[in-house]
Amino acid sequence: MNSSLHLSDWLSFAASFGAVLAVMAVLLFALKKIQTSNLLGLPKRRMRVLETMSAGPRQRVVLMRVKNQDVLIGITPQGMSLLTTFELTEEELAERDAPAADPSIQNNAPLAQRFADLLKSASAGNQNNKNRS
């Protein structure tokens, strides 16, 4: 019995490992997209983190949008402090309230409903093809 691995075994192992890493990356990307979008039909969030910046080893500055204000918060191991607030300008309000250019973003139906509609349209297309034959 030969216990040494041949080149083809190593290539097969490397390809399998690469495939697992690729699947994990795709799943993480999809989870991030689902979390940040409204695909699941969750209520729209009233708070968003716009930017985060590290100010030191354990200090951060966070810019958040809450309702019609941008809020700058300092975060340290001891606690959080409000640094300042900024009112949104008219352009920022218009941009926030404007409908998205991408129609898929405008459709905020839950994912399950959108999938059911897709299946209905696909089955209707199949029924039309069977009726023609």
Image: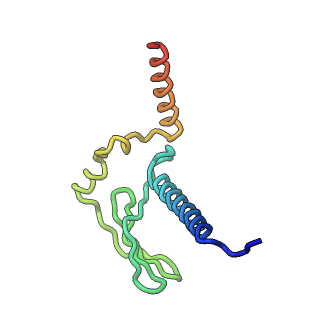
- Is 48 situated above or below 5? above
**Which quadrant of the structure image shows residue 51?**
bottom left
Farthest left residue? 91
Q: Residue at x 45, y 19 (%)?
A: 129
- Residue 121, x across and y down, in percent: 46, 27
Q: Reply above or below: 116 against 49.
A: above
Q: On the rendered structure, is 8 left or right of 51? A: right
Residue situated in front as seen by the camera: 118 or 105 = 118
- The residue drawn where x is 37% and y is 45% is 105
Taking the image as shown, residue 6 lies to the left or right of residue 104, namely: right
Residue 42 is situated, as x and y percent measured from the top left of the image, at 50, 47
Work out which quarter of the rendered image holds the N terminus and state it: bottom right
Residue closer to the observer: 19 or 104: 19
Q: Residue at x 39, y 65 (%)?
A: 64
Could you tell me residue 81's position as x and y percent?
A: 44, 76
Query: Which residue appears at 43% of the width and 55% of the height?
Result: 46
Going by the picture, which residue comes out furthest to the front?
1
**Extreme residue in the bottom direction:** 57
- The vertical placement of 46 against 83, above or below, is above
Quadrant position of residue 91: bottom left
Lateral position of residue 43 relative to residue 13, left or right: left
Spot the residue most to the right. Answer: 1
| Labels in figure, total | 0
